[in-house]
Every structure is written in C-alpha cells, then in structure tokens.
Image: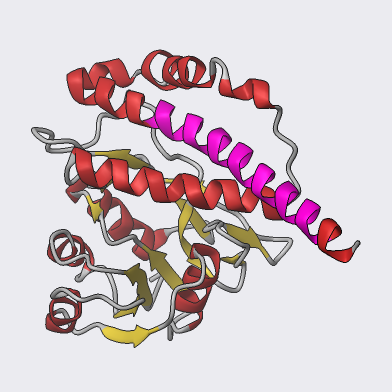
C-alpha cells in the first residue's frame, strides 16, 4: 500500500450544519481525525466526538497559523486537509482509495467546486479552486503558516505532485445573509493585511473594480452556467473586491490621521 496511514485534519468554528456530511464522506478514508476548534458554541464538538475525532482548542489568530497548528497535531506523515464545509464526492473518494493503494506522487491537488441550492455535485466547467495540494506527505510538503495563507510549500527538492480528476464539493453557501457577512469580514482582513504589507493601492482602483471582477468570474469563469445563483455569487464577489479597496482607503486615512495627531501632540 502506498499510503499506509492517513490523518485528516480540519479547523472549525460553529460548523454543526455541515460537519456531519463532511466527516461522513471522509471517515473510512482516514485512520485519524484531528479537529482544531477555535471556540464553537454550537454542537460542532459533540458531532466531531461522535466520529471519534481528536479535538484540540486553539485560539484563533489567523488562518495560516491555525492550519499550521492543526497539521502539526497529526500522528501520521500522510495527511488530508478539509475545511468544515468541504465534502469528498463519491468519485473523489474512489480516486483517493486508488491513490492509497498505488499512488506515485507525494502530494495531490484536490479540485474544489462550489455547490449551491439544487446542485448535487460541482460543475466541472465552472472556474474552481484547482491549485491547492490537500493530500500530501509531510516529508515533502508542509503548511506554510504564513499570515492568512493556507497553502503548502515544498520542503524536499524531490517533492512531486499530481492532480485528482474528481471534486471536493464545497458547501460554502448557507444563505445570502451569511455570505454577505462572511465577505464583509473577509474584506476587513484583506484591507488590514494590505496595510501591514505596506501595499500602495491607487484610489482609482475603486472605479471599475466591480465591473472587471464580475466579468472575470461570470464570463471568463463561466459562472453563468450556474444560472441565477452564479449571477448572485458574482455580484457578491464584485462587491467584496470593492470593499477591499474601500476599506484600504479608509484604513490608510485613519493611519495618516493618527500619525498627524502624534506629530501635533509632540510639538
């Protein structure tokens, strides 16, 4: 067997609605389930315990640190990473079983496709997340741990990777209200990170950014194939883009004003 033992690791916060389906899709693929929770107040912990998961509390700082910490808690060198809204499709389940038996790479990209109401599986023709290595051997690949980044990096020059054909079904959508709230919080983080990294976005990016982002996803990303849900999602993504630059503009002026006040106070 190419992969003798496999650990699943996840980070969670109030995932009671989606977690049962996620764990059910992966439980017979793995030999260990590690869940790092940042303070769930619903039945997330109870559900995880019912699947035999090892549960560890870790205070949230940023996603890069959280996934790195979760990865380090795994017992086995081969690991599978899922989020609390990501379900292994039946087709991907079979593909991973074959990899466990006779794989020839030490890392695998698992394509991730969005699921909306009325859909059973991800549409392979719509733009999806296709660059994330989610099944890997930690002798060759590890989580980067970078601020707000959840990507793996190569630590061995001989590291290789392949790409699975089948999908993780991504159930990120619960409601429009939940999506708007999530994007609002995400834009806060994106703007704050840009300030920390000393980005210098032009104010003119506020003009046209929504139109360009909508065209990028709805037309070039083929989200029009998802009907009205694709249209709604692309409008939300466009607004997220606008909020990122608007909040960066806001934070830049707050920082400048604070520096001005410090100088005035020192006179």
Q: Is residue 232 magenta?
A: no
Predominant SS of the magenta segment: helix
Occupied quadrant, residue 16: bottom left
Looking at the image, residue 156 lies above or below residue 199? below
Specify the color scheme.
secondary structure
Question: In the picture provided, is 208 more to the left or to the right than 116?
Answer: right
Q: Position of residue 210 (x, y in %)?
A: 47, 21
- Residue 79: tell me if it is visible: yes
Looking at the image, residue 69 lies above or below residue 152? below
Q: Position of residue 154 (x, y in %)?
A: 66, 61
Q: Position of residue 206 (x, y in %)?
A: 57, 23
Looking at the image, residue 123 lies above or below residue 44? above
- Residue 110: tell me if it is visible: no
Tell me which residue sits at (12%, 82%) in the image: 50
Give the magenta-colored segment's residue range.
237-262
Tell me which residue sits at (31%, 39%) in the image: 113
Looking at the image, residue 90 lies above or below residue 158? above
Q: Position of residue 51 (x, y in %)?
A: 15, 79
Q: Between residues 222 and 235, which one lies in front from this camera angle?
A: 235
């Amino acid at each position: 067997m190419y992969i003798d033992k496999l650990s699943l690791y996840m980070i969670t916060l109030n995932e009671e609605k989606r977690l049962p389906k996620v764990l059910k899709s992966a439980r017979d693929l793995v030999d260990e389930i590690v869940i790092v929770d940042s303070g769930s107040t619903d039945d997330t912990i109870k559900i995880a315990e019912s699947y035999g998961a090892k549960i560890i509390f870790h205070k949230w700082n940023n996603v890069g640190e959280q996934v790195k910490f979760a990865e380090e808690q795994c017992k086995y060198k081969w690991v599978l990473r899922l989020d609390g809204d990501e379900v292994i499709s039946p087709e991907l389940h079979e593909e991973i079983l074959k990899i466990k038996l006779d794989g020839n790479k030490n890392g695998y990209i698992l394509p991730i496709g969005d699921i909306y109401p009325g859909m059973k599986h991800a549409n392979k023709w719509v733009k999806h997340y296709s660059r994330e290595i989610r099944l890997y051997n930690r002798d060759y690949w590890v989580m980067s741990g970078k601020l707000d980044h959840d990507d793996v990096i190569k630590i061995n020059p001989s590291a290789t990777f392949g790409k699975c054909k089948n999908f993780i079904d991504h159930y990120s959508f619960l409601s429009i209200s939940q999506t708007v709230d999530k994007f609002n919080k995400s834009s806060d983080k994106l703007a704050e990170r840009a300030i920390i990294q000393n980005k210098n976005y032009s104010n003119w990016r506020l003009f046209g950014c929504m139109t360009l982002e909508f065209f990028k996803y709805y037309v070039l990303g083929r989200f029009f194939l998802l009907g009205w849900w694709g249209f709604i999602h692309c409008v939300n993504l466009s607004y997220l883009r606008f909020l990122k630059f608007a909040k960066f503009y806001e934070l830049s002026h707050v920082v400048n004003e604070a520096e001005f006040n410090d100088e005035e106070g020192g006179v």
